Amino acid sequence: MSWRRNLFAVTATSFIGFTGFTLVMPFLPLYFRQLGVDDVGEIALWSGLSLGVTPALTATLSPFWGRLADRFGRKIMVERSLVSFVFIMTGMAYVTRPWHVFALRAVQGIFAGYGALSLTMAADSAPRDRMASAIGTVQTAQRLGPALGPAIGGVVAQFAGLRHAFLVTAGFYFAALILIFFLYDERASHHIVDPERGRVSFRNVLAFENFILLMTVIFGLQFVDRTFGPVLTLYVTQLGTPPSRASLVSGLLFSIGACATALGHHVCGYLLQRAPARVIIGTSAGLAAAGAVAYAVAGTTWILMLATPVFGLAIGTGTTAAYAAAGTIVPASARGAGFGLLTTASLTGLALSPIVSGFLGATSIRLVFVLDIIALAALGLAVTRVMITTPFTAETQPEAVDEM
């Protein structure tokens, strides 16, 4: 079927692109040292600025690129992004000053946004009863790619050098571009480019029932998911793990969490065939809160080993359910703008989470998990009480597009 080929193209492109993105970024501090920055403080400053500028600009501009995709087509917008990444990563291999890296990362943030568009393309291509499964498949690829990227990048950097690793990354993006160009058929999707119908205002998208609530859910789940990063290694040490083994144990916990979250993305589609999104999201928030409770009261790292897969599975399931519910609310002709706004919510949670976690962790690491419990309980309660079980869709509300 054409929709299955489209889904394969989007999934493979997402996996290759997200793998390439994380292939070199973890080693950016080492690259600044190669560029002549010797002071540790300066290296940390340049690394922080360069790593932060891309998601910040992506969060700002994703709705804009999504709106253009609604007017001119998703495929060409993804191709635009991937072409720019090929040139940017190639340029990164030849920089000579730290500010060159920062400037290229800023340009990358301006032209990014294909992650949100990939989810939109999956939602557009799949039949209505397979939309959640299609979104979950792409999200699984987007989750697993970053898990493999650093390992591949480490091998490449070891044997070929960091500069050549950027060229390998450019090759990854070029391969993704070829895949989407030849395999994805936009004619087989449910999105028809119509410049007149594509004039979508963000206020109209936000007015769809449940949409602001779903934005809040995605922000909250992303925020909670990323609170662990700044404090986990310190926490396992606090629980009695020798400092020499803390990195190994925390790395194992991160890997278990990532795999469990990917599994949650994957199984969500099957769950949504048996229960409404409101129930799935509410239950997921409750299970994630239970995992956070186990973290807050843990007296040994073995408790963390048991709680992490529960937490990760719940976060993955709840996130995919929220995106799938949004996909049924927003008409196909406005879905690019809608998913762009959801991506902005996700990236905002990603940006704020480490800051809040760091401040709380400075007082007590367990406070971080207490905050997670409160946030997840509030999300679950809000969804259970407020979310409408049968939201309107493009099929039941065709006039919604005409009003935009």
Image: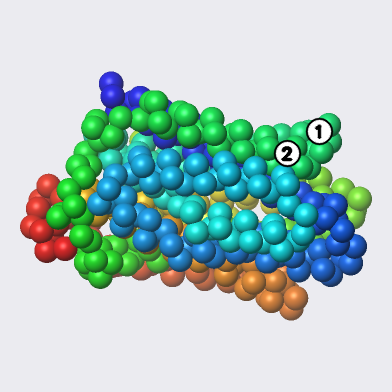
- Residue in the image at 58% along x and 44% along y: 87
Label pair 1/2, CB-CB below 8 angstroms: yes
- Circle 2 SS class: helix
Disc 2 residue type?
Ala
Callout 1: few (<14), some (14-19), or many (20+) C-alpha neighbours within 10 Å?
A: few
* 304 lies left or right of 258: right
Residue at 75% across, 37% down: 164
Pick whichever, 72 or 57, lies toward us.
72
211 is higher (above) or lower (below) than 149: below
Type of residue at label 1? Ala
Q: Is residue 302 above or below residue 259?
A: below
**How crowded is the residue under tag 2: few (<14 C-alpha within 10 Å), some, or many (20+)?**
many
Q: Name the residue tied to disc 1.
A: 160
Q: CA distance from mark 1 to mark 2?
A: 7 Å
Q: Position of residue 195 (x, y in %)?
A: 18, 52
Please tell me whether mark 1 sits on a helix, a strand or a loop.
helix
Give the residue pinned by disc 2. 165
At which x and y percent is residue 56? Answer: 54, 65
